[in-house]
Amino acid sequence: MSDYKATLNLPETAFPMRGNLAQREPKMLKDWQEKGVYSKIREAKKGKKPFILHDGPPYANGDIHIGHAVNKILKDIIVKSKNLSDFDSPYVPGWDCHGLPIELMVEKKVGKPGKKVTAAEFRQKCREYAQKQIDGQMADFKRLGVFGEWDNPYKTMDFKSEADIIRALSKIVDSGHLEKGFKPVHWCTDCGSALAEAEVEYKDKVSPAIDVKFPVADVAAIAEAFGVSEGDLTTHKAGVVIWTTTPWTLPANRAISLHPELTYAIVEVQPSNEWLVVAQDLLESCMNRYGVEDFREVATCTGAALDKLKVNHPFLDLEVPLILGDHVTTESGTGCVHTAPAHGVDDFNVGKQYDIEVYNPVGNNGVYLENTPLFAGQFVFKANDEIIETVKEKGNLVLNVKYEHSYPHCWRHKTPIIFRATPQWFVSMDKKGLRAESLEQIKQTKWIPDWGQNRIEKMVEGRPDWCISRQRTWGVPIPLYVHKLTGEIHPESAALMEKVAQEVEAKGIQAWWDLDDAALLGSELDNYEKVTDTLDVWFDSGVTHYFVVDRRDDIPASADLYLEGSDQHRGWFMSSLMSSTAMHGHAPYKEVLTHGFTVDAHGRKMSKSVGNVVAPQEVTNKLGADILRLWVASTDYRGEIAVSDEILKRAADGYRRVRNTARFLLANLNGFAVEDAVAEEDMVALDRWIVARAKALQKELIEAYDNYDLLVVSQKLTHFCSIELGSFYLDVIKDRQYTAKADGLARRSCQTAMYHIIEALVRWMAPITSFTAQEIWETLPGERSEFVFTETWYEGFNNFTQSDTFNDALWHQVLSVKDAANQAMEQARKDGELGGSLEASISLYATESLYNVLAKLEDELRFVLITSGVTLTKVDSAPSDAKATDVEGLWLSVDKASGEKCVRCWHHREDVGSHEGHEELCGRCVTNIDGDGEERHYA
């Protein structure tokens, strides 16, 4: 028996089967960094049309979590795809560096500022801490394969950034949007500071819900309004009833709000014989809540008839007015709204119309001030029970029950917060039309998904003025001087702020506190007070469009895209929109794309206590970053993103299918040089078709990348590798690739197809599985640039067209026939009638239309079915034992192939043994060894 192995075209490649990504990727990263991959991409794309994805800065505190990884990977995939589309698409990562979380961490180490350390020393410690956090996060982001200006990121704590944040504030001041006010703001008693809208989260809380009677004071006027006698009002101890879930705000009550158009009723309740005033529409529900079955409606009047009439506070020696407000509804309660202007926005606004005192008895720490009657020194939430007891002792408690409801909490401390009026600086939403202009800008922006537009519109429509001041140490100052008598800011504030900005640019934010105020104000010094508040950190990140996008030389245009989690409609998207519109009159972005939050396989939020946290560092150390990247691209990231060890394992399985496809292509390009490529018109029909398929697929993939539909990209890519290539094309051409004459047209044709496909595939993969794509790139034949990332989408098959005859329709029909044949042969194997498929000869019986399709392949149909023989006849001649198939118009039978087995190609052929010198070979193999090589036309 002769050894013909050396005559076969066996696959060979340096590209390994196993990815070993966890070990290989760090070495590749080191190599990329040394070679300056990012700068080489920038150089290659210099002068091209820009596409700018502006990075929303993560907070410089703690290790990155899986949500960070999702965010950064999504951005990197999009930026890399834009570079492949020949855009100049830089990526400048950034960090948010000021604010309370860092202060709290530093306080644990060095104590509070002004005690063990000075404020200046404390700020320096905060700066050092933030930098250390940035260094750790940056290393983890790089490990994910994210490219960017890592040597020159933006940081809100850079002196230049701090100075430009002040300049941005100056522009808003100059535009007339800033105002100082004593208004209720979200206040965290643990932080001791006001909170931004984005720093508030809502969770369920059980509160005491009480109905409280405010006894009538203006007896005569109220009796007249209802048309009853004064004596009856007095005898029946009449009172207006309010409902509240915040008893602690009752000491600050200064009014009761009624709706002017609602009808209010006096209700006599038994057995107490009291008269209670509630909204007529809520009368039945109130009586049900109170458990009162015996009641009658005595009289009614409109809310407008009670305007400015007085009732008595339920436990203080104080008369409070009934006032009118459109915010009053009949959705719940009594229709009579307890109004404490210091503790609610609606309360404040309606009180302002009536010039009602904004009385705030609560200190920064949530404790009643020393001069608060009855409850001085008590923490507000702990005082609830005593307040309720006091109301009860006064005879004014109608009902007290426990009530579970959604309540605002501090997102840092996870504790309930309060509304509390304090002197603060606000960006006014309406003073200069900021709300209306912002709503118009929202309409000019593309929101992806489109529900994002409605969401942010509702938020802008209902949001209060933006409180931008904080009472913290580690933050950009609000460098204003306020006149001691008038309360007005200095008329030259813009010029003064620029001088401060110049100092800060040289020395950092400490310059404001070290500044010699006399040097700035001169003789006016005694007339002005220096503001010591710091800016809301959402202002810092909200003006990055100004000090990063607009002012950095390495960003050539304004931002096209903002991409963050869906919580940022109320966070960074909002603060950026507000600041940019206030400063420039337009939104800072053209498109806004959001992704969902990561959850486990059961839809639960990630939680250390539940034990379902998936750390990206562990994934990269175990599976590699490319698996994590493929998982991100394989999810519908616009909703919740499920992750677990099992889900990542499935991503790894998908990765292996793509990697094995690439390896097969590379291994079978062994011995192929670019100049060996066959012209399209000379290629075997199947080869020409698969290249045309790849060309059509590339168009679909580019469109999906452009639409940020990464799930579509990964699905189409995986399907092409698994089905059209793995299950069909590559399966069919193995025989030709391995056994045809090495440099014959039959083999060079399929090598040409594989070359075009791998050249395209490596580019399709590059944005997602970046490490593997570069690994493939370095293994490809021919001269090429150093990195796949500097390339554009493959153009080498641009002239390919699909044959009119051997087109998608034909090959998909053939594929279905192949599947049917495989099923029949598999059954024959199970029945012991057959070994491998090359032991089989298949008889196909087809209706005329299918017969005409299959007949076009002539004798090469057997190569498609991977059998030693095929006979094709019309269905009329089908024997009775022919088996029906799932393919319409097809019956078949499977028989053992006649003829001996060729030891080289393993086909069973009648002519084996008839070739002198090659008695063990079929004629086809003899031609491929000693002759000009076999001819193939179709497959």
Image (tube, rainbow, N blue to C red):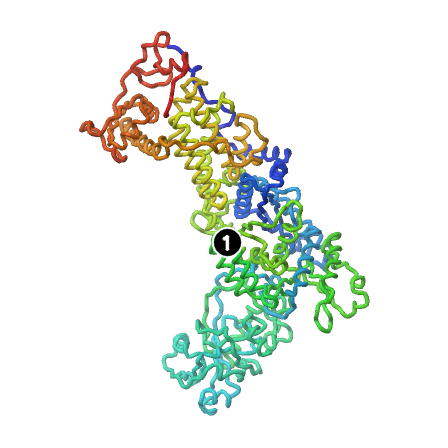
Identity of the residue furthest to the top in this view: 916
User: Which type of secondary structure does the marked residue at label 1 adopt?
Assistant: strand
Q: Count the numbered circles shown.
A: 1
Image height check: is 901 above or below 267? above
With respect to residue 620, does 868 lie above or below? above
Residue 470: x percent and y percent? 64, 62
Along the horizontal axis of the image, is 100 left or right of 295?
right
Query: Based on the displayed image, in which of its 4 quarters is residue 5 positioned?
Result: top left
- Residue 836 shows in the view: no
Q: What residue did someone put label 1 on?
A: 447
Q: Nearer the viewer, residue 580 or 608?
A: 580
Residue 102's place in the image compared with 398, above or below, is: above
Query: Which one is nearer the viewer's eye here, 586 or 520?
Result: 586
Which residue: 57% across, 71% down? 343
Which quadrant: the C terminus? Answer: top left
Residue 232 visible in the displayed image: yes
- Residue 910 in percent (x, y) is at 29, 15
Label 1 environment density (alpha carbons within 10 Å; few <14, some 14–19, many ≥20): many
Q: Amino acid at mark 1?
A: Trp
Direction left: furthest residue: 880
x and y percentages locating residue 853 in the rendered image = 30, 30
Above or below, 605 against 324 in this view is: above
Residue located at (44% from left, 15% from top): 6
Figure quadrant of the N terminus: top left
Q: Is residue 119 or residue 32 the one in the foreground?
A: 32
User: Which quadrant of the view contains residue 22?
Assistant: top right
x%, y% of residue 42? 62, 39
